[in-house]
Amino acid sequence: MPGTDSDTPRCIEVALAVPLFRTFTYTVPAGIAWPVAVGSRVLVPFRNRAEIGICLGPGTAPEGVRLKPIVSVVDSEPSLPGPLIDTAQWIADWYAAPIGLTLRGMLPTLLLQTKTPTPRAKTQRVVRVVQELPSLLQREQTFARARQQRVVYDLLEAQGGVAPVDALLVQANCTAGVIVAMVKRGIVEVKQEVVERDPFANRAGVAPPPEPSASQRAAIAAILAGDPGQVFLLHGITGSGKTLVYIEVLRAVLQQPGRTAIVLVPEIALTSQTVDRFRGAFGDSVAVLHSALSDGERLDAWQSLRRGERRIAVGARSALFAPLERVGVVIVDEEHEGSYKQAETPRYHAREAAIVRARAEGALVVLGSATPSLESWERANRGQATRLTLPDRAGGASLPPVQLVDMRAVTKIERAGRAPHAPYDPMLGVLSPALLKAIESRMVRGEQTLLLLNRRGYAAYLQCHACGDVQVCPHCSISLTYHRVPEALICHYCQYQAVVPTHCAHCGTESIRRRGMGTQQVERLVAERFPEARIARMDVDTTSGKWAHTQILDRVGRGEVDILLGTQMIAKGLDFPNVTLVGVVDADTGLNLPDFRASERTFQLLSQVAGRAGRGPKGGEVIVQTRMPDAHAVRHALTHDYLGFVQEELEARQVPAYPPFVGIANVVVSGTHQHLVAEAAIAAAVWVRALLERHAIAGVSIVGPAPCPIDRIKDRWRWHFLVKTAQPRLLTRLARYVAERAPVGTDAAHRTADVRLVVDRD
Ligand code: ADP
Ligand code: ZN
């Protein structure tokens, strides 16, 4: 370190994984090489324990404080390259998160253990085929009477020509002598090899289509001509072939020696088809970072990237932190997806953080979507991103026609035609005759149907079945939530309350119902109506197993499923040419959630799921059932009209102001005692208002406090208020100040009720 002479103490700043907004200064004793590289793991004493921390650079010793020395530097090469440290600093700043917790999220847990901070790679004995026998004739000649050798060979071949000795012996149910014999004959060899635990290894990749179309070529060329750090918004309709654009951009970038790439997808489990395409194009250069990886598997993948053996990281949100150097491009597929926002500290949005990391790396950014988020659309409108368009479906397919079924009319017909005391037929309220008929014709033709019912498991709402009216808060443009005890309709943003009506305020009939049909009930109805159908259901309940999603989707791909029914999980990235019908059972479910993004999410969901139909030569159709056909999210989805939707939605976000026009920080106070949480939230809001007044800060509004939409989670009560402002830097400072200083959790009562405050930005 220049300027460091021998008599000033050698100090470093260390980030530790504790929920504190500070770093810690340690000295570096003689005998440890100086300087300590930024991003290296160091072992330090902390609260009478040894902890792993990250070196953030040289520190200054405060006057008169005796600093403790570090124990050792664990890494020979820094675990975290410089641009990742910069990204972490930005996340900590922007999202008001402790730097130590932010950095912790960037490392595999096994690298944070103090016992064996550098676990050794596992090795095992494997059998590998050395003499290939591709034809049946060759095999019959080679193994004429050696039946068991033939079994071993076939098993090996099925596993890509290599398998662990132990596992193979079990599978083949034979003795080691069989393998020894095969080694002697020169058919296989046995070696001690480092095993990389890669659960994706035995999935076949999918070859990309041969030739990009003219619009794909134009997009590829524009991206490759971009400047370092430039952001592209690739707006391509469903089925337009965005994946091929990504692949060609990756190919060109990786041709530059030493360049690497990151590809983010919403959820690996749901996008196995997309991942298979990347593997098909780049094979072993791809490390797939899957949320279902074990700690060991994650470490293996991480290390192979760090060592540069694999140059492409594909994964969900946290793959953004892949320890690659010289990243040339960061791709964010389906950039509008809500799953890019992390719900725990640090509460970052991977799309925003991707742009920051790319800038630090000098890399290109490609944000792809058929239904870009309003944030990205506005970013392009302001000239901070370059918009590219793929207006047509690839390979000559066209977008499927969408038919609307107004379920209010179905209810009316049903009421009129029913004898006064006849039993209610649930089928009619759920699956319209039009949808049933369409499913039936698919069954007859051997084609596949997707049925979407996005019933998320919280608070129902009230809707008039005759006219579709749902009661909305007069102050917040957000639907009121039905509460049972005490019975009321409540706005979850401002706490406005209304009594539960018996008659519809709009049409005067007594048709108000609680809405709450879930996927299980629909599955039963469909099975009753089509007893011969092979039905698969895909929702949180059916996909708890590690590879459950992939297994269901693989079955659909092999044609073993006639009807796939599910929640929004089935709307993502699926590309099955034999799916010719998509039915949306209830388009309204998401519209009435207490969230300013409700319309945007509904439009995205409807467009995305509609985009699953008609990808093959047989074409397709979409049937959308709704009681709110006039909602702009529904109207524009019928005509695949993204631009029309965006225009109306952007207008709706102006008054009252919501993103992208303002930044929002959601301040959430939680704890085990309801009244203490309410009190603390109110006090914190008063404190913020006073702060604004004292410093004469203008242009900030505080909305609330009020109970959160889900006001109790895991026995913790939750209140929140919103801080809104159009000045991002001011919001950064405020968020940080509130997170660090708000008078919450400081007094004894708060501590017994474990009252805590968190800030969640955007
Ligand atoms: P998107 O992600 O934009 O919805 P995909 O990347 O899944 O679209 O592509 C849709 C389908 O079109 C895929 O089956 C893909 O193989 C095919 N496809 C993409 N580009 C071409 C092309 N240039 N020619 C023929 N088929 C293509
Ligand atoms: Zn309100």
Image (spheres, rainbow, N blue to C red):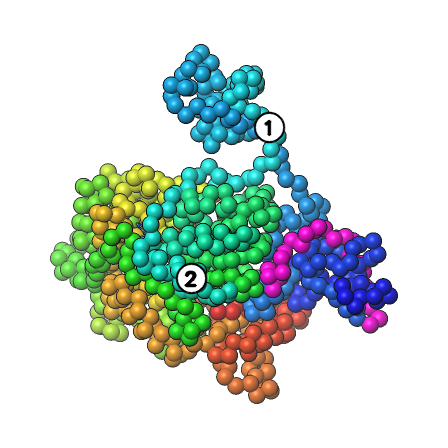
Give the magenta part as a residue range.
Answer: 63-86
CB of mark 1 near ligand 1 (< 8 Å): no
How many other residues sit within 10 Å of disc 1, few (<14), some (14-19) or many (≥20)? some
Badge 1 is on which residue?
Answer: 191
Q: Residue at x 42, y 75 (%)?
A: 382
- Residue 11 location (% of width, % of height): 78, 63
Can residue 665 be seen here?
A: yes
Q: Is residue 433 magenta?
A: no
**x then y, percent, for residue 225:** 44, 63
Give the image location of residue 592, x and y in percent: 35, 66
Q: Residue at x 38, y 52 (%)?
A: 244
Main SS, magenta region, reads: loop
Image location of residue 641, percent across then percent down: 27, 66
Quadrant housing residue 693? bottom right
> Residue flagged by tag 2: what amino acid is it?
Ile
Look at the image and tell me whether residue 415 can be seen.
no
Q: Is residue 349 above or below residue 743?
A: above
**Mark drawn on residue 223:** 2
Q: Is residue 207 above or below residue 465?
A: above
